[in-house]
Amino acid sequence: MVSDDDEQSTADPKAAGPIRAEPDILEGAAWRFASCASGAVLSPVDTDDLKWAEAVVPGTVAASLTLNGKAWDGVDIDGVDWWYDVRFAAEKGQSAELVLDGLAVLAEIWLNDRLVGSTADMFLADAVHIDPLEENNRLAIRFRSLSAESFPRRPRARWRVPRLASPDLRWARASLFGRLKGAVPVPPVVGPWRGVRLIPSTGLRIASRRLVATVGDGQRGRVDVMARLRGHTYPAEAAEGILRVGGREVRVAAESVSEGEWKVEASLTLDDIEIWWPHGLGEQPLYDVELQFAGQVHVLGRIGFRSVAVDRSNDGFRFVVNGVPTFIGGSCWMPVDPVGLSDDRDRLRSILDTVVAGNQRMLRVSGDTVYESDTFYNLCDELGVMVWQDCMLAFSDPPADPQWEELFLRETRQNLERLSGHPSIAIISGGSEIAQQATYAGVALESGLPLLTERLPTVVRECLGDIPFVPTSPWGGDIPTRPDTGVSHYYGVGAYLRPLEDARLARPRFAAECLAFAIPPSRDLVDREFGGSAAAGHDPRWKRAVFRDAGASWDFEDVRDHYVREFFGVDSLSVRYSDPDRYLDLGRAVVAQLVERTFSEWRRRNSTSGGGLVFYLKDSLPGAGMGLLDSDGQPKDAWYAMRRALAPIALSISDEGLNGLVAHVHNDTPAPLDATLRVDLFVDGELKVDTAERPVSLTPRSSEEVGIDALFDGFRDLSWAHRFGPLTYDVVAVSLVDTNGVVLADTAHLPGGLNRPLERTLGLSVDAVTVDGEDSSVELTSRRFAQFVTLDVPGWRAVDSGFGVAPGQSKTVLFKRIRKDARFAGTVFIVNGGSLPLRRAAT
């Protein structure tokens, strides 16, 4: 191993040489695919009679079916064999590396009718040395039927998982995506879902690499690099090269470890590094890591210097980023392309931009999906989005089988090495709901989970250094279902129909999943996809998007309807029967309230919570899915609610009963905050009867609590907890105003609850609408309190929506055009009022 103590200098950027992309002989080649009964065709020689069609590579069987105009949900994808092939020309006698980035699931690889390799793990990349190639070649891949595969029956699982489409899935190294009962239907992952490349053996290529960036004392950073290079035509003797990071370089030597394979290990120290922060807390500086050998420059990746730890004191679980305890809010990731699993950069960037705009700091890639592409993690680095990364296990008892365990650990090591160096990777979990499923099944884990508690942590440390780790999620305490210790999946507010107060009573320390509801999408999507709200709930496609636990007699629309009854005091069935538009409006409003108030509760300065991740970020299908974004990637009202609760400068109110109302002010920015807290009291939703103000000064990344009742002279009972008489104040409006008079944040508390009478004369008006290219702004004023005001403009995205407008308040809302040539015309909806048109003002 070479370190910078041996030799280091300042690099000359001009001496780096050209950065070459590895040539791919298969680039632009035409792939095709076909199906047959399981075991009907065992060799590519016998495939002439199959019905071939154009295929998407990289891509899934479902993506290729879609390309050819066939519905994937009408095909038993796991129940048949699938053949892929491609014909290509090459220089006769040429040698090459066949690089297989991911084949799902049970694959045989044939070149020119000769079996050259096989794989039984879709998460494991591999390479096959091909020597020699012919002038005309055929590469064929057979994907065997997963349903027809015979897996071992011993050792037996310690518990059943009713959600699995087949109990044999615990043995298969295959994604559970598309293979779970009750989940939103998505296709199972079959086919060459990651790249298939044929690289000429004319030099060295990077087979794998591990980058570990650590922050030392002061502004010093250290980079430890391990790289494996392959090149069967490269000289066998050791060769020298150069490692470059951030303008510094060190000479390194490649050690031959086997025929055609070399290893490089080196370290390098940098002074005066810039620290990487999650968005909203600071900047995201990144450093390229380059390795130069024999005139070739290989970019090993980009790194960021940051430290991430977890404070687990007193049974807690709070992320500490760069030494700063940090409240984390975010959501569970859903692949942007659930059919083909493509890694289109523009689509990923659009969704991740929305994550950042929504003030979410973390995404969880859960163990029942897939490892994401390099593009995803690179974008998270650039945008400051932290990633909770599960290993690809979920629900089942991991087989205590040495061969299976070794395959899993090999797969995990390979993927964690690929993820190493990414500053966005914040924590690794062994999988999802493994110990929890055992608990629900009444199984005591006397023998524990040694794979996840003993062997896996070693692999994680070797690949990623000192990074937080949990064996599975949830985890901690005497039983994993307790939310007040360690990591939980908190559905007290949600599936378990607990009151909103349970978010405090249960004391969840960190909720890796929470707040799952069937959230109605925008009116625009409902109208486009289902022909209006009256038909939507009765369209079979609507219910396909609604999650239902396997074996449950209810779904997550029933959960939402329960809270509509609790908060608005109406019978959901009756409202849906007589006014389906209002039925969906109340559903949107109640979920937004639950999300905003729960996260505001957890974010309080005196709360024991370290944060939570909503289940899920995005819908896979049109309808009332659990995503904060709809299937088009557009925000739902709950996204706006979460955006307000997680804002870097945020304001919320908690009802502390006999202790009155408390305002919670948060400043997560790296700058101090000087502002004024203003409180206005209204009666009858219109008449302002009193006002109070108080200056607040917050240091960077701090919070403050202010008792609102104490700001006024005398006894006020603003929470209406004492009940000495009728409700006095029905609206308590609170705002945070900077030194220039700009409103930084505002909110309102309704002491009488959300169930306000429906009015038709609120006096809400649109005072001005201006359109300037891709931007627009709307100014709203209201004579009476307007509750849950939403703005629906097809083709445009509002910066804020689902807010209250206090009497006499003026509120300006900005819009961005998201659909080319969309004219600015829509509607304003008010839960306690009617609606009015929203369109561009005449000019």
Image (cartoon, rainbow, N blue to C red):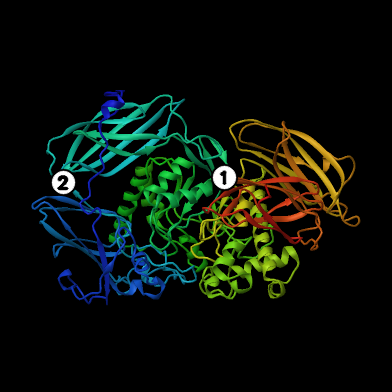
- Tag 1: amino acid: Gly
Asked if the residues shown at circle 2 and circle 1 are in contact, with their CB atoms under 8 angstroms apart, the answer is no
Residue 458 appears in the rendering: no
At 40% from the left and 75% from the top, the residue drawn is 74
> Is 520 drawn above or below residue 219 in the view shown?
below
On screen, residue 347 versus residue 402, left or right, reads: right
Percent position (x, y) of residue 58? 31, 58
For badge 2, the amino acid type reads: Ser
Along the polypeptide, which appears first: circle 2 or circle 1? 2
Q: Which residue is mark 1?
A: 773
**Pick the front one: 315 or 191:** 191
Q: Quadrant of residue 195?
A: bottom left
Residue 326 location, x and y as percent?
Answer: 57, 41
- The front one of 693 and 511 is 693
Q: Bin the neighbour count of mark 1 within 10 Å (Cα to Cα): few under 14, some 14-19, many 20 and up.
A: few
Q: Residue at x 51, y 72 (%)?
A: 550
Left or right: residue 731 versus residue 611 is right
Q: Circle 2 — which element?
A: loop
Q: Which mark is residue 201?
A: 2
Q: Residue 123, image x and y in percent?
A: 33, 57
Q: Nearer the viewer, mark 2 or mark 1?
A: 1
Label 2: how many residues lie within 10 Å, few (<14), some (14-19) or many (20+)? many
